[in-house]
Amino acid sequence: WMSGPYALMAACNLFIQTLSNVDGKRHLDGLPIRDLPGGQIAATVLPRSIWDLLLFSGVKAEVWMQPGVSRENLADNTASAYDIPLGARDGKVALVLGAGNIAAIAPLDCFHKLFMEHQVVILKMNPVNDYLIEFLRPALRGLIDFGALRIVTGGADVGDHLCRHPGVDEIHITGAEASHDAIVWGGGDEGAKNKAAGTPKNTRRVTAELGAVCPTIVVPGPWSDADLSFQAEHIATQKLHNSGHNCVACQMLIVPETWDKTDTLLARVRGVIYHAPPRPPYYPGAGERMRAFAARGATGDGGDGARCVVVALDRGGDGWLENNEVFAPALGTLRLAGDDGESYLRAAIDYANANLHGTLGANILIHPKTIRAMGERRFDELIGELHYGCIAINAWTGLGFLMIQTPWGAFPGHTPGDVQSGIGVVHNSYMFDAPERTVVSAPFRPFPRNLLSGGASLLPRPPWFVTNRKAGKIGELLTKFEHKPGLLKIPRIFLNALLG
């Protein structure tokens, strides 16, 4: 419900809002803007409505713009495709190669090409989840009947045929770096030679959202026993959601080496994993990747191999764990030195930037008192040095995917020759042309326990947690709310949220 129908329904509503007001960029009216320490600006895209305040209580999402985008020229760097007169726009045919994991990815990628770039789309579904076609065709019937969308199925041979078809102008893929490189450079030895020579086999524009070795950074601080338990559920969720078959699943858990709470936290993460409902790895090759992952880790942090492989990183090893996205329930841990919260966070940021492959998403779990001790401005400076397309503070970057208001993609700067987590962004219902990153923040403690420390959020255990007993029901209710919002639907959502 949450990552399929709800996300797609929310996207429909958000794009309706934007497109209804895009003339004169009126959809930007009243958008809160703040100045960042380095001279960039950040736009708050959530909360923006009473529904946001009620359903995402305490959650905030900002879009940090690339250098050069200012308060004065933000409108000029937003929805610029709509600045072109209708008769002067060039039509194109885009091929979207759909992902095989999350149900909403493929149609949302189509929305980007259709509404952001004025391109008609042929969507080729992944064989892993092409059963969705029987639902997507009626759901997207308006676009299909209009002639703007076609949905097809088939194996790698069909994908290869379409990638080379002269009627296709551009390609967008959500998947693995290897798949992107096979499209651009070719396969096998030929592809390796083409890539080394800088001579692509496919010269079309190719945008991509690819995975990464995504980190979760645990910052030492005055965590209570209840904080350790809650954040252990949080970390387990970042790994186990969709059985680890997520491009932003946590793959490297970075913890403080000398913190007296590290061993307790790791033990509770293992406990949550062990007691979680079984989520069998379903994606092709997951078992082989899990075995390879386990073989390259050092001993020390244990785990339940049936549900999730948990191994400690061997800093003297070959770097395989740091450079290969596992796309399966497997988690690496790294104990990192640092004398205090700020120096430790600084070291963790340096490590992630320098050693972990990809730039899609990074999570930071940090006590509010630790942020206050280093100062909000200094904390912003440190966040600005972490080069990821989505950064979640006391949240999971999967929430950044779920919020269609926010751009979704790699940190800018990758090239076809070193694509890592991809090129370009999707979602982005405000249609920002030059976003740098999304920063999502959530309450450190859930309601009602947060009230004891002065928190004002009404967000209990989030519905995306794998430990939430009412996740399915909440997702269904949220989807029905998006279909037809109404105040009378809120109490039932709240009740199930509290029972979860």
Image (cartoon, rainbow, N blue to C red):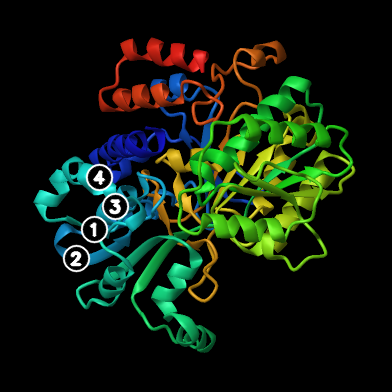
Name which residue lies at 25% across and 45% down.
23
Q: Secondary structure at mark 3?
A: helix
Question: Badge 1, how many Cα within 10 Å: few under 14, some, many 20+?
Answer: some
Q: Could you tell me residue 283's position as x and y percent?
A: 46, 53
Q: Quadrant of the N terminus?
A: top left
- Tell me the residue that label 1 is attached to: 118
Of the two numbered discs 3 and 4 in the rendering, the one whose residue sits closer to the viewer: 3
Q: Could you tell me residue 118's position as x and y percent?
A: 24, 58
Mark 2–mark 3 Cα distance, whole angstroms, equals 28 Å
165 vs 73, left or right, is left
Q: Are marks 1 and 2 in contact (CB under 8 Å)?
A: yes
Mark 3–mark 1 Cα distance, whole angstroms, equals 25 Å
Mark 4–mark 2 Cα distance, whole angstroms, equals 20 Å
- Tell me the residue that label 2 is attached to: 91
Q: Which mark is residue 200?
A: none
Residue type at mark 1: give it.
His
